[in-house]
Amino acid sequence: MERRQRRYRRVDRVVAAAGAALCAGLGACGCSGGGAAAHGTPGGDPVAVLRRAADRLVEAGSSQARTSMEMASGGTRVTIRGEGVYDFRQRLGRLKVLLPPDPAGHSERRPITELLAPGALYMKNRGAGVPADKWVRVDTAGLSDGNLVTGGATDPLAAAEVLRGTRTATYVGRTDVAGVRVRHYRGTADLADAARDASAGHRDSLAAAAKGFATAAVPFDVYLDDDGRIRKIRHRFSFVNGSRRDTVAVASTALLHDFGTPVAVRLPDGEDIYAGKIAEAPGGEN
């Protein structure tokens, strides 16, 4: 029985480390890189193509998005999923983030509504002492991971902006993503380079991640359609939970579809933002 209880506590610690329970506290983060340069592919030089991928999303205007964040620590693996919409021109998004069931598997946790904005993350249904009708606002430039991990879902445009720091890339070949023919690339990006070339809305957050992670190298797989738009992107991160020194491996994926879909995101008014202290829920419970 005690062994089972220890395992349940470990599952919640992993969920908390993802930042769905924001006060779990992230320490320095690290990534491992890989990939080799390749040229003469159908879309041109892979490095150049990928560095322009964020611009192609802005040109597309908007899309629907699905996200997943898989975390593994101490032999325990959990997945946080999200779904919503994103306006790439306004740099605003809305996601409903679904946490895993409680460790005993008896009840579903309430979904967290997240609003993504330049330099800020807003969360509703945050729990842990926050009134149900209030939002929590977080300055993403003040997070050691720049909100690449903390929110439990990587901002889709931030994920694309990471590619501005592409150092090495290989064209893998043609494949399908959700019925769409795409070009698959694999490579490594440097967060410091990405921050220098990123749009103003994500520059500070990526710079924070470059400083806060143990290494600025980020391995990725990305799938572009024939218009150069990202259909799927997957980053691999690892970070050390500052409170316990546990290493957490993270695979963050975003799927983009239905480009041009109408998007209306309204950020909370000042009186709707919770100004009190945010308590850490026991065991990461929300």
Image: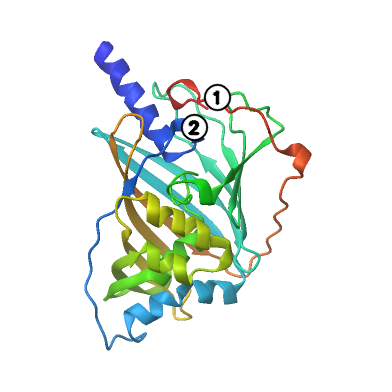
**Color scheme of the displayed model:** rainbow
Residue 265 image point, x, y percent: 69, 55
Q: Which mark is residue 74?
A: none
| 202 in relation to 240, above or below | below
Tag 2: amino acid: Cys
- Does dot 2 land on a helix, a strand or a loop? helix
The residue carrying mark 1 is: 279
- Residue 113, visible in the rendered structure: yes
Residue located 24% across and 81% down the image: 38
Task: For the N terminus, give its image quadrant.
Answer: top left
Tag 1: amino acid: Ala
Q: Quadrant of residue 284?
A: top left
Residue 171 image point, x, y percent: 28, 77
Q: Which mark is residue 23?
A: 2
| 84 in relation to 4, above or below | below
Q: Nearer the viewer, residue 82 or 235?
A: 235
Give left or right: position of 85 versus 173: right
Residue located 24% across and 78% down the image: 37
Bin the neighbour count of mark 2 within 10 Å (Cα to Cα): few under 14, some 14-19, many 20 and up. some
Residue located 44% across and 81% down the image: 226
Bin the neighbour count of mark 1 within 10 Å (Cα to Cα): few under 14, some 14-19, many 20 and up. some
| 109 in relation to 248, above or below | above
Query: Could you give the CA–CA distance between mark 1 and mark 2, rounded to whole angstroms?
Result: 7 Å
